[in-house]
Amino acid sequence: MADDTYIPPKVWKWDAESGGRFASINRPISGATHDKDLQVGKHPLQLYSLGTPNGVKVTVMLEELLAAGHSGAEYDAWLVNIMEGDQFSSGFVSANPNSKIPALMDHSTNPPTRVFESGSILLYLSEKFDAFLPKDPRKRTEALSWLFWQMGSAPYLGGGFGHFYAYAPIKIEYAIDRFAMEVKRELDVLDKRLADNEFMAGDEYSIADMAIWPWYGALATGVVYDAGEFLQVHEYENVQRWTKQIAERPAVKRGRMVNRTFGKPETQLRERHDASDFDTRTQDKLDPEGSS
């Protein structure tokens, strides 16, 4: 139940001890906390990320581009350990002033182009390589609408439901009920869309699928927050079909491994600097229904 004895103060003050699991990395100010340059590898595209859903979006996109024959999409993926505050280094803040993963630096331009926010990175890469965005104006608009749907909806799943259900230091019934209701509504939106469409934009696989799958595919398989039974995710049969279909793609299997720091060792590729880095892993043996 909610604490009905709490009365907000006239002026809010930051209590660093009250933030739960992520208290050490959450703060009410922006900017760098320490000086450290970003590492730069041999490829024009330099990704600084972590294998969370937002990070997986971009590594899946890059691996899909390479699988489609776009050799210019070769990339280095550097691990950003957010629990250790890597996102607050001067180098990372220069790439993303919002201090959130992922961030991309494109060194094929002079000066290098920085791209931050996962949806923006997907769109940037799609336009750069003319791939995974329908050519037909109506279908293209549909894909972009679903891309931005994900950007607006996922915070209710992550910072809303996920935080209060899995990470908050205390369980608040009102907060969990409120966000569980919204997440189930979102699943219903997706399920109805996918009832008559193979992919989110229609009959073409696109950046909309790459954006939505790491979040809602993981939710549909019960991986995220271990909330499958609580949310009865099996009821969303069209989401289940789509989730499994996307998960079977070889590029998706590779992309979800990159910058991953949890799970079985063979599912992790903490940094990726060459396609041969996957040779020491067994991505073909990964559970096709899992995601992160």
Image (cartoon, rainbow, N blue to C red):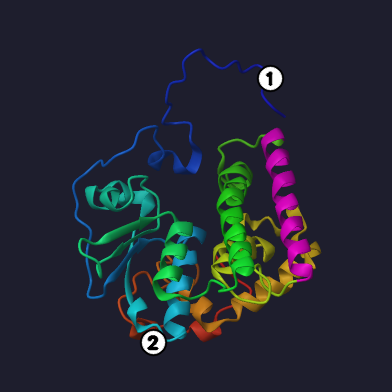
Indicate the quadrant containing the C terminus: top left, top right, bottom left or bottom right: bottom right
Q: Which residue is farthest front?
A: 137
Please state if 71 lies on the left or on the right of 157 as rendered: left
Q: Is residue 193 above or below residue 283?
A: above
Expressed as whole percent of the image width and height from the top left, the position of residue 108 reads 25, 70
- What secondary structure do most residues of the magenta stretch adopt? helix
- Residue pointed to by mark 1: 4
Q: Examine the rendering and report whether any part of residue 153 can be seen.
A: yes
Indicate the quadrant containing the N terminus: top left, top right, bottom left or bottom right: top right
Assign a secondary structure to mark 2.
Answer: helix
Expressed as whole percent of the image width and height from the top left, the position of residue 258 reads 42, 71
- Residue pointed to by mark 2: 279
Give, as a single range, the part of the protein colored magenta: 174-196
Label 1, label 2: how far apart the Cα atoms are:
56 Å
Assign a secondary structure to mark 1.
Answer: loop
| First of labels 1, 2 by sequence position | 1
